[in-house]
Amino acid sequence: MYMKRLKHLAIALTVVEVILVAGLLYDVLLARESAAAYSYSSVYYVEGTGYTDSPSYDSSPYAAYSPDDGYLAERWGVSKIETPQAWQITRGDPSIIVAVLDTGISKDNPNLACRVIAEVNFTNSPTSDDLYGHGTHMAGTIAAIAPECRLINVKVADDSGKCEPAVVAKGIIWAVNHGARVINISLSMRASPNLEEAVNYAWSQGAIIIAAAGNKGGSEPAYPAYYVNCLAVAGINRNDSLALLSSHGDWVDVAAPGFNIYSELPDNQYGYKTGTSAATAHVSGVAALVFSVAEDINGNGAVNDEARWAIENTCTPIAADGVGQGLVNALQAVAKTTSLD
């Protein structure tokens, strides 16, 4: 009888173990499925061991940016940072150029092609076009927030999404020398003296660099975002919590929507991405709006310092830790800038 009870107990324990293992496998599979569905890894790493994007596609009948467009409902981040309200003051200006340092900008998307006024390819790809999908997505968000501003396509990440600090540094200098006032770097890489020098050069020439805090989920610094003359951006979701895997820390300056962000993709498609890359694009759009109304208050010959001050000091405080001043607010940033005139 005693041996029979032990046998039954052993069987019961085995069943429990099977259930626990099955549950663990389900969690792993669910996590992988979520990664594919939400593309939560939008930042590229030099070593090639970082995360990559798997965007979900759908077509969109909407072509023009307007507060009345139905597709703004899809772009929850644009509304959350009060962009439509900011448009009552400014929708940007054609003189304000935003450089997108990324995998390129798709030439076949009508929303973006008419906004790109210059391009360059620093990679070994045979084309400056976006064959990967990341740069187009970032450009779409920027244009959705600052529709009157212009873009330049600076391809520094190759067709597999990889880039090197030295190449990004060249891209920064080229962008500044070709009139960029805002430089969007939704990329993350190792530290580099050349990269830091390029960042400092951009700032000295009156430009502002908006850079992704990275998707490692911790407080480890990401570059170029960590450099003092970059505005480092973390990502949040609809509930003002950190987006999946968003890096954070006392070196981060601001946060912006970075979860399930809807924007343009190659082949005239639209889809969703999650990560600090998308959050960075939101802040670059806000910066473009601010630049369109900023004045040189302190007489130093540039307005990037006024623009950065306005963006950081008009954020909405949120409960998430390690997100700097909080959630960027397009309306408040623009309004604060105009009040300084």
Image: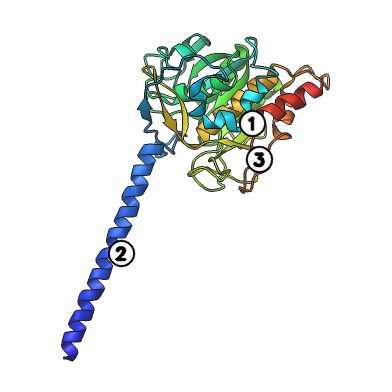
Residue highlighted by disc 2: 20
Amino acid of disc 1: Cys
The circle on residue 230 is 1
Task: Locate residue 328, reporting x and y percent.
Answer: 65, 34
Question: How many residues crowd around disc 2 within 10 Å: few (fewer than 14), some, or many (20 or more)?
Answer: few
Which quadrant of the structure image shows residue 77?
A: top right
Report helix, strand or loop for mark 2: helix
**In the rendered structure, which disc, 2 or 3, sits on the residue that comes first in sequence?**
2
Which quadrant of the structure image shows residue 66?
A: top right
Q: Is residue 148 visible?
A: yes
Q: CA distance from mark 2 to mark 3?
A: 40 Å
**In the rendered structure, which disc, 1 or 2, sits on the residue that comes first in sequence?**
2
Q: Residue at x 57, y 42 (%)?
A: 221
Q: Quadrant of the N terminus?
A: bottom left
Which label lies toward us, 1 or 2? 2
Task: Locate residue 242, reporting x and y percent.
Answer: 55, 45
Task: Locate residue 78, reporting x and y percent.
Answer: 57, 28
Question: How many residues crowd around disc 1 within 10 Å: few (fewer than 14), some, or many (20 or more)?
Answer: many
Residue highlighted by disc 3: 326
Q: Is residue 195 above or below residue 259?
A: above
